[in-house]
Amino acid sequence: MLFGQSVFQSVVDRLKHEKETEEEGAEPPPPAGHRIAGFSSGFVIDTHIETPPPANGNLDAYLAFLADPAQPPEPEPMPAHLEKTSLADVSAELAIHDTDTAATLAEKRRAFARLNHPDRVKPQFRHNATLRMTAANLLIDQAIRMLRAREHFR
Protein backbone atom coordinates (compact mmCIF):
# COMPACT_ATOMS: atom_id res chain seq x y z
CA MET A 1 0.00 0.00 0.00
CA LEU A 2 1.32 3.41 -0.96
CA PHE A 3 -0.50 6.38 0.58
CA GLY A 4 -3.69 4.44 1.02
CA GLN A 5 -3.62 2.75 -2.40
CA SER A 6 -1.81 -0.20 -3.88
CA VAL A 7 1.21 0.17 -6.12
CA PHE A 8 -0.84 -1.11 -9.03
CA GLN A 9 -3.54 1.52 -8.44
CA SER A 10 -0.93 4.33 -8.25
CA VAL A 11 0.56 3.21 -11.61
CA VAL A 12 -2.90 3.12 -13.19
CA ASP A 13 -3.66 6.64 -11.89
CA ARG A 14 -0.36 7.96 -13.23
CA LEU A 15 -0.93 6.44 -16.68
CA LYS A 16 -4.46 7.84 -16.73
CA HIS A 17 -3.12 11.30 -15.86
CA GLU A 18 -0.45 11.08 -18.61
CA LYS A 19 -3.04 10.03 -21.19
CA GLU A 20 -5.29 12.97 -20.25
CA THR A 21 -2.43 15.47 -20.62
CA GLU A 22 -1.53 14.02 -24.04
CA GLU A 23 -5.12 14.35 -25.25
CA GLU A 24 -5.30 17.96 -24.16
CA GLY A 25 -2.18 18.73 -26.14
CA ALA A 26 -0.35 20.14 -23.16
CA GLU A 27 3.36 19.72 -22.94
CA PRO A 28 4.42 17.35 -20.19
CA PRO A 29 6.35 19.11 -17.41
CA PRO A 30 10.14 18.82 -17.65
CA PRO A 31 11.59 16.08 -15.52
CA ALA A 32 12.66 17.21 -12.06
CA GLY A 33 15.68 14.96 -12.05
CA HIS A 34 17.77 12.49 -13.99
CA ARG A 35 17.23 8.80 -14.18
CA ILE A 36 20.26 6.61 -13.70
CA ALA A 37 20.73 3.73 -16.10
CA GLY A 38 20.70 0.36 -14.43
CA PHE A 39 18.28 1.36 -11.72
CA SER A 40 14.55 0.92 -11.74
CA SER A 41 12.41 3.86 -12.73
CA GLY A 42 11.70 4.55 -9.07
CA PHE A 43 15.22 5.86 -8.41
CA VAL A 44 15.47 9.49 -9.49
CA ILE A 45 18.08 12.03 -8.47
CA ASP A 46 16.62 15.47 -7.96
CA THR A 47 18.97 18.02 -9.50
CA HIS A 48 16.78 21.03 -8.91
CA ILE A 49 17.70 22.64 -5.60
CA GLU A 50 16.24 26.07 -4.97
CA THR A 51 18.55 27.17 -2.15
CA PRO A 52 21.49 25.22 -0.83
CA PRO A 53 21.18 24.21 2.80
CA PRO A 54 23.49 26.07 5.18
CA ALA A 55 26.77 24.31 5.87
CA ASN A 56 26.20 24.36 9.62
CA GLY A 57 22.41 24.18 9.62
CA ASN A 58 22.11 21.95 12.65
CA LEU A 59 24.75 23.85 14.60
CA ASP A 60 23.19 27.21 13.72
CA ALA A 61 19.77 26.02 14.83
CA TYR A 62 21.20 24.70 18.10
CA LEU A 63 23.08 27.92 18.83
CA ALA A 64 20.03 30.01 17.98
CA PHE A 65 18.06 27.91 20.43
CA LEU A 66 20.63 28.46 23.17
CA ALA A 67 21.16 32.17 22.58
CA ASP A 68 18.75 34.55 24.23
CA PRO A 69 19.52 37.96 22.71
CA ALA A 70 17.24 39.76 25.15
CA GLN A 71 19.11 38.48 28.21
CA PRO A 72 22.93 38.56 28.08
CA PRO A 73 24.56 36.38 30.73
CA GLU A 74 25.53 38.23 33.88
CA PRO A 75 29.21 38.15 34.79
CA GLU A 76 29.99 36.05 37.79
CA PRO A 77 30.80 38.16 40.86
CA MET A 78 34.30 37.94 42.30
CA PRO A 79 34.55 35.93 45.52
CA ALA A 80 34.92 38.21 48.53
CA HIS A 81 38.30 36.85 49.61
CA LEU A 82 39.83 37.65 46.20
CA GLU A 83 38.86 41.30 46.50
CA LYS A 84 41.26 41.78 49.43
CA THR A 85 44.64 42.25 47.73
CA SER A 86 46.48 44.59 50.08
CA LEU A 87 49.48 43.41 52.07
CA ALA A 88 47.67 44.21 55.34
CA ASP A 89 44.62 42.12 54.37
CA VAL A 90 46.73 39.12 53.37
CA SER A 91 48.85 39.48 56.52
CA ALA A 92 45.75 39.48 58.72
CA GLU A 93 44.42 36.42 56.88
CA LEU A 94 47.68 34.48 57.29
CA ALA A 95 47.98 35.43 60.99
CA ILE A 96 51.75 34.95 61.19
CA HIS A 97 53.07 35.00 64.78
CA ASP A 98 56.50 34.83 66.41
CA THR A 99 55.63 31.35 67.65
CA ASP A 100 55.25 29.90 64.13
CA THR A 101 57.77 27.29 63.04
CA ALA A 102 58.97 26.48 59.53
CA ALA A 103 56.46 23.61 59.41
CA THR A 104 53.50 25.79 60.46
CA LEU A 105 54.54 28.49 57.96
CA ALA A 106 54.72 25.88 55.18
CA GLU A 107 51.25 24.64 56.13
CA LYS A 108 49.89 28.21 56.10
CA ARG A 109 51.36 28.68 52.61
CA ARG A 110 49.73 25.47 51.33
CA ALA A 111 46.35 26.30 52.88
CA PHE A 112 46.44 29.82 51.42
CA ALA A 113 47.41 28.48 47.99
CA ARG A 114 44.52 25.98 48.01
CA LEU A 115 42.09 28.90 48.06
CA ASN A 116 44.00 31.61 46.20
CA HIS A 117 46.36 30.12 43.63
CA PRO A 118 45.77 31.65 40.16
CA ASP A 119 45.50 28.21 38.55
CA ARG A 120 42.59 27.32 40.84
CA VAL A 121 40.37 30.34 40.13
CA LYS A 122 38.44 31.42 37.06
CA PRO A 123 40.42 33.36 34.43
CA GLN A 124 38.69 36.67 35.12
CA PHE A 125 39.87 36.54 38.77
CA ARG A 126 43.49 35.46 38.15
CA HIS A 127 44.98 38.94 38.48
CA ASN A 128 43.67 39.34 42.03
CA ALA A 129 44.68 35.79 42.92
CA THR A 130 48.22 36.50 41.66
CA LEU A 131 48.42 39.64 43.80
CA ARG A 132 47.26 37.71 46.87
CA MET A 133 49.69 34.83 46.30
CA THR A 134 52.58 37.25 45.73
CA ALA A 135 51.79 39.02 49.00
CA ALA A 136 51.42 35.74 50.90
CA ASN A 137 54.70 34.33 49.56
CA LEU A 138 56.47 37.58 50.42
CA LEU A 139 55.16 37.57 54.00
CA ILE A 140 55.86 33.87 54.58
CA ASP A 141 59.36 34.07 53.05
CA GLN A 142 60.09 37.07 55.29
CA ALA A 143 58.83 35.19 58.37
CA ILE A 144 61.05 32.19 57.49
CA ARG A 145 64.10 34.47 57.11
CA MET A 146 63.33 36.06 60.50
CA LEU A 147 62.95 32.59 62.04
CA ARG A 148 66.36 31.51 60.68
CA ALA A 149 67.96 34.73 61.90
CA ARG A 150 66.58 34.15 65.41
CA GLU A 151 67.87 30.58 65.40
CA HIS A 152 71.27 31.79 64.16
CA PHE A 153 71.69 34.26 67.03
CA ARG A 154 70.72 31.83 69.79
Image: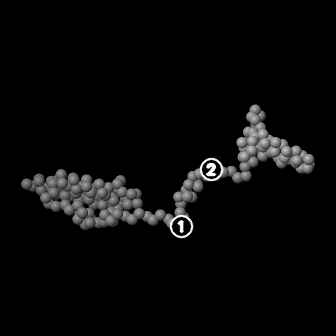
Q: Is residue 70 left or right of residue 86?
A: right
Give the residue number, with chain letter if any, for mark 2: 55
Q: Is residue 111 left or right of residue 58?
A: left
Residue 87, compared with residue 60, is above or below; it is: below
Looking at the rendered image, the quarter that the C terminus falls into is bottom left
Q: Residue at x 78, y 46 (%)?
A: 32
Judged from the image, the secondary structure of the residue bearing numbered disc 1 is loop
**Rendered location of residue 51, percent (x, y):** 70, 52
Q: Amino acid at mark 2?
A: Ala
Residue 141 appearing in the image: no
Residue 70 bears which disc, if any? 1
Q: Are marks 2 and 1 in contact (CB under 8 Å)?
A: no
| Cα separation between marks 2 and 1 | 26 Å
Q: Residue at x 22, y 53 (%)?
A: 107
Residue 123 appearing in the image: yes
Q: Is residue 91 left or right of residue 98?
A: right
**Rendered location of residue 4, percent (x, y):** 72, 46
Looking at the rendered image, the quarter that the N terminus falls into is top right
**Rendered location of residue 100, percent (x, y):** 15, 57
Q: Amino acid at mark 1?
A: Ala
Which of marks 1 and 2 precedes in the sequence? Answer: 2
